[in-house]
Image (spheres, rainbow, N blue to C red):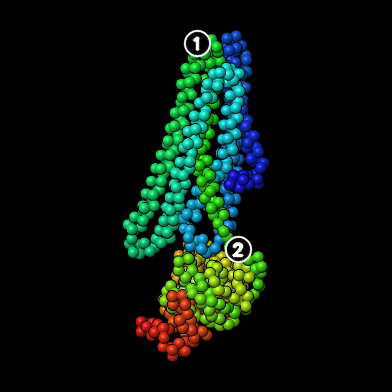
Amino acid sequence: MLKRFLAYYKPHKKIFVLDMLAALAVSLIGIFYPIITRSMLNDLIPNRKYNFIVIFGISLLLLYILRMLLNYFIQYYGHIMGVRMQAEMRSDMFRHLQTLPYGYFDNNETGKIMTRMTSDLWEVSELAHHGPENIIISTISIITSFIYLSTIDIWLTLIIFACVPFLLIISMSLRKKMRNAFKKSRESVGEINTALESSISGIRVTKAFTNAEKEEEKFEVGNQKFVESRKEAYHAMGLFHSSTSFVTDVFNVIILISGGIFLYNSRIGFGDYSAFVVSVALFVTPIMTLINFMEQYQNGITGFQRFLEIIDAKPEEDETDAADIGTLDGEIEFKNVTYGYDDDRHVLKNVSFKIEKGKRFALVGASGGGKTTICHLIPHFYHVDSGEILIDGIPINKMTRESLRRNIGIVQQDVHLFNTSIRENILYGRLDATEEELIEAAKMANIHDFIMSLEKGYETNIGERGVKLSGGQKQRLSIARVFLKNPPILILDEATSALDNTTEIMIQQSLEKLCQGRTTIVVAHRLSTVKNAHEIVVIENGVISEQGTHDSLIALDGRYAELYRLQFRDEE
């Protein structure tokens, strides 16, 4: 893990080296004050060397000005380096998230992923910046102060340094407990973000059902978990700091007693004793810095571990012999396909069917029967457990996912639009499309006239998830997006089920245009929309119970006929 962390310093070697040199200079400048103090007390003041007193004072002031400039460099450029490393990690994480399979996002909440990308990586960047500085400044300060104190009196120095092992023992014993507590605390922050993301995205539903109190209760559950986890973390941190602070306080007692005895026995002079007291402060301060650094280290290393959990998640990988298949014709075949989202339950069981190029194929049946799962398996969003899916006679696992998905257009009931302009949302279908192609796609989707009625036209921002548009307008934008993509295979997953009858008729007109010349898989609850399909399949409990045209299935008087009569009666 350390090797992977250090790799992020590589692009910033120049700033890092300069930052470390500045940190080294700052730590060395610190030792000049006790040296000058000792010289003044032992020589300059008793011997009335006033000129040297002024010279030494001015020299010390100049050194402090230099240290001020160096500290500015450390704070500014050190933080810039940390932020750039943070940005690179965030880019790596985002890039890797794009490669992860559907199943990863089924099992990991958006809020927790966002926490790892934001607050966790902020802690990592703080560690990246302050960690090396604290270690270098503190280590050099401890070494130089030890050497200097030894020149005054080696035995008094060894007495004080004898306390260091106690600090190390306490730090090591409490370190693991504090690390675990802070990791638990970070997990609770992720739960809060998940609840917050869910509540905010569903605020309109909450208001519609006047369930604000319920949402507050749900949020408070995670909020209280956070409080309890922070209590545990602060308890561990309190033990750590109070114990280590006590040991450092003991330093002052030891220097007071032992130094006083040495001074009383004339082993050292008053100037040496005074310089010793000042130098011990220079020694204790970096010790405390290193101790406090442990907290930052725990935060940063925990954040980096959580970052690596995402980075190490297995991405979607094409098989070694998978090839870019270019443009497909669109003949689709399922051969004895079995699939389940978990090991305990299969959603599809030994399903087989064939869709000829350019034909319209409808999937109907009760919710949970496996219709949407079939739609997810065709673009290879999930791996089948057994069996095979072929397009144009080629197994889809022998195609690169990118080339396969280029050939497939999907229109779903739950349309996802981005918080940007209408233009950019349509262009998502094909980013290199021309203005003429963009407008033609909008016209084919019967949305161009509406767009032009807006003040900013195609530059109109539609808000988060297209909140500024009606359901029908959002659906037509998604259809325009697929028109622009112009794929040979089209999947309509209950594309009109959430719309009113008038809007549905309008959308159906757009969909009719879209389906022409394409192999189309239609999932629909409203059977009136699939009457003209070339073939209809009834799926129940993961198996095909009936298959045929609308007329043949009505004549069969089975499950499809029953569903059709029930729906016709409901509509009446």
Q: Earlier in the sequence, mark 2 or mark 1?
A: 1
| Amino acid on which the number 2 mark rests in the picture | Glu
Rendered position, 119 above or below 385: above
Mark 1: secondary structure: helix
Residue sitting at x 62%, y 78%: 392
Residue 131 as seen in the image, left or right of residue 560: right
- Return the x and y of residue 232 as percentages of the image width and height: 40, 43
Q: Which residue is mark 1?
A: 264
Instruction: In this rendered view, identify the residue nearer to me: 412 or 221.
Output: 221
Give the residue displayed 41% in from the left and 86% down from the top.
Answer: 558
Q: Quadrant of the C terminus?
A: bottom left
Could one spot residue 135 in this view of the protein?
Answer: yes
Residue at 46% x, 48% y is 186
Residue 552, percent across and down?
47, 89
Q: Residue at x 56, y 35 (%)?
A: 134
Q: Which disc, if any, is residue 317?
A: 2
